[in-house]
Image: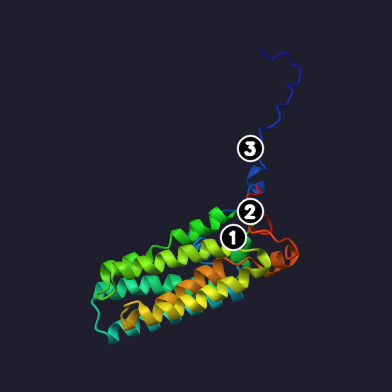
Amino acid sequence: MDTGHPKASTPAAPGHGPHAASRRAPRADPPTRVRHRFTKALVGSDPSPGELATTLACALAGTALAVGACLAADLPAAATAVTAVVAFDFFGGAVATSTAAAKRRYHAPGRTLRHHTGFVALHLQPFALALFVPGFGWWTAAALYLFALACAVAVGLTPLPLRAPVAFCATATGSTAALLFLPVPDALAWLAPVMLVKLLLGHMLPGAVRATAEGGAHGTEEGRPVGAA
């Protein structure tokens, strides 16, 4: 029943009402979302145009070199395809992990040695190559994988001022040992050096800003002593 009195207006719920649409952020179109996800996976959430361009250039150039070596060695198509995927990841990652965008992502506050070595442990690509590439054995894959993982742990446990020298030492000696003693097909001669550059020199080293800020703290996990929470 209408009593003749004006009805009290009920406030619109948040997100509703005539002006709700204008307050909502516009959704990106599908190509933009795909490009954003690809960029985030490749480099980080907010890389600069130069970081992204350099990463892509190295990834494509390294893939072209690896595929050319596979074709010259007359490797099977499946071996060439798997090698191309691994090369794109490792050559691109060798650059991407050195960028400020990647450092903000992987060395943000709260990231610990467990996070850093977990990333290294996920790099099972040597075993994929052993499965598809003739002449690249399982023992070679295991040796390279375990060496990279052990060195990542060693770098992470090293006091911050010495972390970079230890990472460079492990990369230089490990690459040389792999080239001299591991039975690797010529088409995969690049694998050990590029993998170690990506994981030890790129991923395991914090950014220059954080290293400078925490350089006086002789801890092992981003400037914290061993065992510190």
Check disc 1 and report the residue beneath it: 157
Residue drawn at 40 percent across, 69 percent down: 144
Instruction: Please state if 82 lies on the left or on the right of 36 as rendered.
Output: left
Any part of residue 28 in sight? no
Q: Which of disc 3 and disc 2 is earlier in sequence? A: 3
Hey, what amino acid is under mark 3? His
Hey, what amino acid is under mark 1? Leu
Relative vertical location of residue 28 with respect to residue 66 in this rendering, above or below: above
Task: Look at the numbered disc 2 and give the secondary structure of its residue.
Answer: loop
Residue drawn at 55 percent across, 66 percent down: 203
Observer-nearest of 77 and 203:
203
For disc 2, the neighbor class at 10 Å (few under 14, some 14 to 19, many from 20) is few
Q: CA distance from mark 2 to mark 3?
A: 52 Å
**CB within 8 Å, label 2 to label 1:** yes
Q: CA distance from mark 3 to mark 1?
A: 53 Å
Hey, what amino acid is under mark 2? Val
Q: Position of residue 16 (x, y in %)?
A: 63, 37
Check disc 2 and report the residue beneath it: 226
Numbered disc in front, either 3 or 1? 1
